[in-house]
Amino acid sequence: MRGQRLVAALMTALLAGCGPAVATSDPVPAAVGPAPERQYAVGMRQFTLDPDGRRPLPVTVWYPAQQSPAPSHTAGSGPTGSGPAGPGPAGPGPGSAGAGSAGPGPDRGPRVRPGAPFAAGRFPVVLYSHGLRSLPALHAALTSRWAAAGFVVVAPAYPRTNQRARAFTREDVRNQPADAWRLIRHLVRLGARPGDPLGAHMAVDRFAAAGHSAGGHTTLGMFASGQPSPVRAGIVIAGGRMVAGLSRPLAPMLFVHGSADRIVPESIGRAAYARCLGPAAFLSLTGQGHGEYLTPGRPGFAQVLATTTDFLRWTLYADRAALHRLPTDATAPDLTTFTTRSIPT
């Protein structure tokens, strides 16, 4: 009954819309459980939300899986995608693992097993949004590593901006925050279904939103009315344009940007960072462009992976050790700079 009441309360908040939140002294609530101390195997599943609707959403899910001795696909670098103003690196390639201090080196990704059984337990959820002319699979080097670190990562392919869209429309980015919220409502409903194979393993009161390029704009759009619950945090990678009427996020926010990005200049990301009312951090990659730092083995990938994973562990697991690791994991001489504002110590 307690679980049903929690889901009912979440659904009421989601269906009513996102009202402004009141800032608290500690923006991160109590943990759902201890943060994982080991890396998980990674599984992958796909489904389509509203397949017969006006805006069907194919969704890829990476998740912590049970260990298996059988060989599986190991992720590597991906092809290119695009940013909000033209072509550029899409970022991570299809599948990978290790993050922060709790796993192997960042260049060796996890083995991704389609349909693998879930690991025991419930895990926080990260909704990841791709950029223009990109696909969820092109970001798997990052998303699968987050899954290995103990998160369920759901990544929709937006209907008018993905690489395979029949009618590509750049301006449709403005509709994507609503798509993302539709997916979150669906996941919350799954969490209320006894025995649902996906819902039974999601902590549906613990979401973060993340995205690259136009997906970063989508992420910011999800915070248009302050801090919506259950979305606890946001990660904006090479994004930051403000939509009309966007208020100032109260949730913890992490910005990642190349200082030489010609598609979305770093100044745009810094302007969004400056508008945040809650805890915020900015990781700048010196001399880098629109996303090469999202490719395993490239300069900056290790820092981006460790910093984003620390941030997710802090905001979704209340892992104070991860919070304290942030400055060290983010900083590499001549490669990165890291600034924060109102981050608890």
Image (cartoon, helix red, strand yellow):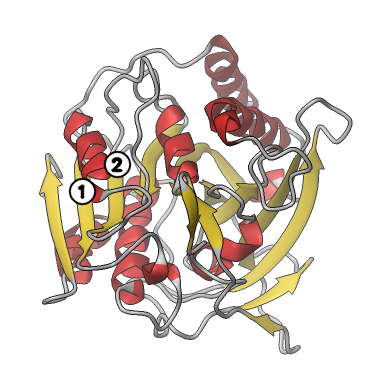
Q: Residue at x 37, y 80 (%)?
A: 298
Q: Which residue is mark 1?
A: 281
**Image x and y of residue 37, in percent:** 40, 71
Q: Is residue 176 left or right of residue 212?
A: right
**Up-down: is 191 above or below 282?**
above
Name the mark on residue 313: none
Label pair 2/1, CB-CB below 8 angstroms: yes
Mark 2 or 1, nearer chain start: 2
Q: Quadrant of residue 139?
A: bottom right
**Image x and y of residue 183, in percent:** 65, 34
| Amino acid of disc 1 | Ala
Camera sees residue 2: no
**Image x and y of residue 144, in percent:** 56, 67
Q: Which residue is mark 2?
A: 253
312, 84: nearer the viewer? 84
**Up-down: is 56 above or below 131?**
above
**Image x and y of residue 110, in percent:** 57, 79
Q: Residue at x 29, y 63 (%)?
A: 307
Q: Is residue 202 left or right of residue 310?
A: right
Residue at mark 2 to residue at mark 1: CA–CA distance = 6 Å
Q: Residue at x 39, y 24 (%)?
A: 243
